Image (cartoon, rainbow, N blue to C red):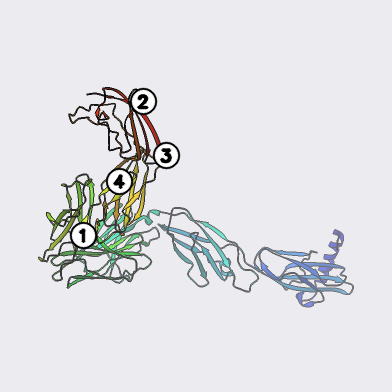
Amino acid sequence: MRITLLSFSFFFLILSTLASYGQGLCDRGGGGFELDKYEGCAPLTVKITNTVPNPILLGYNGGYDGKSLNPSFVEVSTATYNLPGTYILLQQAAISTGRVYACKTVKVSETRGIASTYSSCGGGKIIMLLTNDAILSAYDEVEIKWGDGETTKWQKGASLELVHNYASVASSPTVMITGLYGAGKACDKGVTVNVPIKFERPQLNEIQMSAVEMRSDGTIRLTYKGVTGIPTNIQYSTDGTSYTTSGKRSTGGTQPYDIKGLNTTQSYKVRLSSEDLCAGSTETQPLSTMVLTGTSTDGTNTLKWNQYPDAAQFDGYDLLRDGTVIKSFTGIGETSYDDNDVECGTFAEYQVVAKLKTATSTSAAVGLKVETGSAKPLTGGSVSVLDGASVAIKADVPGAGPNTTYELSIERAEAGSTLFKKIITLYNENSYVDNAAKTSELSYCYRMSYENSCGQKVPVSEPICTILLTKNLTTLNWTAEAPILGGFEGYTVVQTGSAGTAEEIPVQKNLRYTAKFNNQSDLEYNFLIRATTVDGDFESLSNIINYRRSAGVFVPDAFTPNGDGFNDILEAKSEQLQSFELSVMNRWGVVVFHSDDITKGWDGTFKGTNAPVGYYYYKMTFVDDINQTVEKSGTFMLLR
């Protein structure tokens, strides 16, 4: 309905006059209208549909107080509510019989953003304080997204102070705060407020421990990184609840600190506590010390240690004997080990190291001396060619270590011989280099035995022999005797070209390999054979064979068949031919010599008499190692 300004003014004059009677207008009734919605989120706009038939005049008051008799009215078809609250929408209509009224209630929910403040304490610690006002009270709960993947839900009645620690301060996160309503309500949430975070004194996060070690004198050696000017307390605890401060430092950089006078059989928790900017402290994740115990019985050392208490930090354990890792464990519950690789009379020091995500925790050393048990046989060893005259011999002596005494005897024989002779006795050493060998001509076999510090001797080991590599044209062959004690995985042919190409070819336990060449192959190659154990503890290398592809045939340009024993035979020389033919002709083209065996040359005679001095011609045909047929001719001088 369209109303002119005159009629609109008249309408209000009539309504104002009519409204001067009675107490409140909602109860007078007679009017009628409907809304498309009766509740919702601010700002809320509702659509009004009049149900009064043929009104003369029609008006609405969107914020009626429920008691006024002369409110103002406006002819509208919608009403908009920008702020939360419960509103009375009043209708007044003029009809032929008088005035009529109707009221509807509209509920508008809060959607404004929640106010807050924050303090940056240092490192990644933030204290967020929600503002306690009508806006906060309107919501059922508050969602705080910290910007690092973590989310907190605040409930009514909880503390308005929320503490959050950021793992990284490399970038500035934005906190998103949103008021939420419970299920079944017309509005589910309000406006999200973004709060950019700026970290103050971010260096607090750099104060971290990298290692903790319990020492045999009851001292915990702590290695940590400090920051200059930031006071940091070094604290320890037996229960993880009550901490004692051992000292305080404000120096920077990586540094050690000793907590003295403690019990080596007690596990302690150690942490750093640094003063922050919120009159509080920032604590590092505690590190726990390790406790190791051990016993020695009948040739076996049994080690036990405490389970690391924090599974979230744990990566594994390393068990060390005399400073060398002898066993690694990945299960947090794996806390014992029997060391059988020890010998009577030997002394060993053990430590266990808990490997953590960002640090290590090492136990005090436990020393054990083996008083009983029998000598164990040698189960590991190898021989390997170093060069043309040297062989390296290595043995895995049971229980050998820096605190072990033993004698290792080494015997040698040429391959195929059963006669072994002692060449050396080593004291507390398990490797030796034999420099009296001809490794390109012979394979050498070695046997080893040892005597431990209790005077117990073991029989000599099985022989192990160097790998002797030879070649026939492009086929490599090597000896069959085992080069590694206790067996090996297989052989590998190592092929290195003169142009820098390199290839490793596994051949399992085969004793022969034929190289494959073509015109594009390198001109020259070196070959050697390598044998290795599955675990890679031992390796054996053969002598090196040199191979020159398509080396050709050499014929001298003169020879002197005068019986002086020097240069008496005309010979063609080559080692890499599959077939060969040579013909020698005089100046008239008569063939004076022919051979299909490269090892047989011309002695300078023809039909039983000495051939005359002078120039001769030769013609040669051969098939080389890559199946190429080559023809070659030339001249030479026969002299006497």
Which amino acid type corresponds to the residue marked 1 in the rendered image? Asp
Which amino acid type corresponds to the residue marked 3 in the rendered image? Gln
Q: Quadrant of residue 54?
A: bottom right
Residue plotted at (56% across, 69% down): 137
Mark 3 highlights which residue? Answer: 520
Image check: 67 left or right of 507?
right
Marks 1 and 4, Cα distance to the nearest angstrom? Answer: 33 Å
The residue nearer to you, when weighing 518 against 590, is: 590
Quadrant showing the C terminus: top left
Give the mark nearest the N terminus, 3 or 4. Answer: 4
Q: Secondary structure at mark 2?
A: loop
Image check: 125 left or right of 191?
left
Quadrant showing the N terminus: bottom right
The answer to whether residue 410 is visible is yes
Marks 1 and 2, Cα distance to the nearest angstrom? Answer: 71 Å
Q: Which mark is residue 396?
A: 1
Q: Nearer the viewer, mark 1 or mark 2?
A: 2
The image shows residue 578 at horizontal and vertical percentages of 35, 41
Mark 4 highlights which residue? Answer: 471
Mark 2 highlights which residue? Answer: 589
Marks 1 and 3, Cα distance to the nearest angstrom? Answer: 45 Å
Q: Secondary structure at mark 4?
A: strand
Which amino acid type corresponds to the residue marked 2 in the rendered image? Gly
Q: Would you call the spot at circle 3 few (<14 residues within 10 Å), some (14-19), or many (20 or more)? A: few
